[in-house]
Amino acid sequence: MVPPGVYMRNASCHFQMVLNEGFGSSPALRVCNSYWIRENPNLNSSQAVNQLLLGMASQISELEDSTVVEDLRDYWPGPGKFSRTDYVASSIQRGRDMGLPSYSQALQALGLMIPRNWSDLNPNVDPQVLEATAALYNQDLSRLELLPGGLLESHGDPGPLFSTIVLDQFVRLRDGDRYWFENSRNRLFSPEEIAEIRSTTLRDVLVAVTNVDPDTLQPNVFIWQNGAPCPQPQQLTTEDLPPCVPLTEIHYFEGSGPGFGITIVALCCLPLVSLLVSGVVAYFRGRERKKLQRKGKESVKKEAASDGVSAMEWPGPRERGYPVTIQLLPDRRLQVGPVLVHLQPGQIHVVDGRLSVLRTIQLRPPQQVNLILSSNHGRRALLLKIPKEYDLVLLFNSQEERGAFVQHLRGFCENWSLGLEVAHMSEYELFRKAVTKEQRERILEVFFRHLFAQVLDINQVDAGTLLLDSSQKVREALTCELSRAEFAESLGLKPQDMFVESMFSLADKDGNGYLSFREFLDVLVVFMKGSPEDKSRLMFTMYDLDGNGFLSKDEFFTMMRSFIEISNNCLTKTQLAEVVESMFRESGFQDKQELTWEDFHFMLRDHDSELRRTQLCVRGGGGGVGDIFKPNISSRVSFIARTSEERSCPQRVGLPASKAPELGGPGLKKRFGKKAGVPPPRLYTEALQEKMQRGFLAQKLQQYKRFVENYRRHIVCVAVFSAICAGLFVERAYYYAFASPPSGIAQTTFVGIILSRGTAASVSFM
């Protein structure tokens, strides 16, 4: 039915010659080269479209039979990969995919007569075509498909099957459409309008649309009869038309091989390159780290002696040991690298590789130092038992290195008149006999529990004891003495703080460098149960450094500086001097250079209630009396008498406020004890005064500027994201509008394709 070409003529019955790319002119448009092609130079105006319609009205179509022109059979526009396809074959395959019935089943369903054999199908068909078709279906007529059977039964017009199907389809469309113009029940059209619609033909529509002379069209444009105006010059054949563009296969990967290969190689090499880069970075960082370590070792070696031995320190049974190096230095120091043991008169300072003090051990004549050596397992272990301290256990590489360290230690003890007793036992017994830091902390816990029980008049049962074998262990804990470092740790302060030095020196009545149970108890009782006078007298005595019974301005300045030091505040020396002068002036002592205790207590007269609540914060509980004796306590306790209104630590050792101006407030109030965290940095800014904009537009502009300043990061991110989306949209839209090959899309959907492709690219990026 479809011809190989289509004529074009004007209103004066002049048939136009059409232009073909690469072929010149031809009498008609070739279907295979024009269908589904959006860009056609012969159809670039509305007048050309009118000529196409007039040409189709004058052209006679092919017969409705089994013969199909090559434009549909071999040169129909194909799918994406191939430019051409077989339209008839694809229609048959599509019918199979959709499950269409066979030719015989369709005839039976529509109530038509079923042919008995192949010759009854259509006597006018070429017998060779029937034989080839029968052989294709294994001589089984029931297997003949719907589309080939409908084409074979046609005699030039649609056969019984296609005619029945088309008629049934149109009847269903009419009966199923409530808005059909012939439906009088919907009252859409009057009988006169229905009659007018019935009398309207396609010829009337073409005349109204194209503005051509009605005499140039036959009454029925679908049928051409003899005597009709503008007959066609001849029936078109493929010989009169340009050949169809042959099949071309589109290789989407063509030209992308090098880029794809480079991408694959890059992805495969990415882990190796990353590993190589990380290895190079690690190498250079390791080299820099080794340089820094060598510099650190050189700086330490400048302080240490050249001779030394290596060892391993054993911290406890449940802890891993770590390697150390022991050296005897010219100024009586032992380096345990990365720990350095500094031997000074009466002291052993344990410092790390950065020369920071980790531990200080008091050694004063006639103290006895016990040294226990292992007698088995290579004789490498050594236990250094120091009175009133936890032990130091060292494992050497060999017995010779241990012997060298013992000789260094003997010389140190002889130099400072210290007794040294050497014993031998097995390594297992040596480890059992060693008092580790963890065991020392458990002993100190019993020490503090019974100390609190004595001060607060709490029963021993409530105070609790450790799960030890006998009361002898408890008595041993109560007879132990605190070193300066342990005392500072119990207060949460540093051993070198001035307050710790003053308090420890005051409490250490016998001057042996340790605090006994009774010495600590005497100080604690004053802070727990003492009157304001007792507390102020204790503070006065603590900072009366020369012991002359007077507190000079320099000593008062030292007291103030210690308060500021332990409270983690920062005042310059000038500011602190101004505060001291202000306090003396407010108390009327501006002419005095020394204060008696009465003067000092008078200076604190306005802070009697603060002195009553001023107490020490000592390790052992959660912050109050009721929490002191809970088991497994390793936090800190504040000995504060709680009132009914206040159930927390209101303050520690307080300082009277001053009315002099200072940083942070109108009065100076410092506390003993270390704060829980690092104090936040103080920022000092200068306010800039700007002229207020009174105009409405100026205010809106200022508001907009503030908005941009506050959300500049968000604005930049949104702008970059929007720019990428807009770029993708413009690129895809431009491609499908101008750069894409012709795809035959109608002009009505062309804009929609551009918008949909552009937005799809943007959405896929999102």
Image (cartoon, helix red, strand yellow):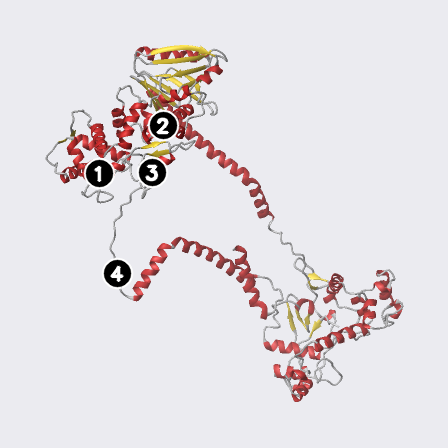
What residue appears at the point 30 percent right and 23 percent down from the top-left corner? 518
Q: Position of residue 32 (x, y in %)?
A: 69, 67
Gap between marks 4 and 2, in whole Å? Answer: 65 Å
Question: Mark 1–mark 3 contact, CB under 8 Å?
Answer: no
Q: Is residue 744 left or right of residue 620?
A: right
Q: Earlier in the sequence, mark 1 or mark 3?
A: 1
Residue 654 visible in image: no
**Mark drawn on residue 448:** 2
Q: Earlier in the sequence, mark 4 or mark 2?
A: 2
Question: Mark 3–mark 2 contact, CB under 8 Å?
Answer: no
In this view, 709 is above or below 752: above
Give the residue at mark 1.
608
What residue appears at the point 73 percent right and 75 percent down from the top-left corner? 172
Amino acid marked by disc 1:
Asp
How many neighbours does mark 1 have within 10 angstroms: few (below 14), some (14-19), or many (20 or more)? some
Q: Position of residue 690 (x, y in %)?
A: 25, 57
Q: Earlier in the sequence, mark 1 or mark 4?
A: 1
Nearest to the observer: residue 592 or residue 20: 592
Give the residue at mark 3.
678
Q: Is residue 659 left or right of residue 722?
A: left
Gap between marks 1 and 4, in whole Å? Answer: 51 Å
Mark toward the viewer: 3 or 2 = 2
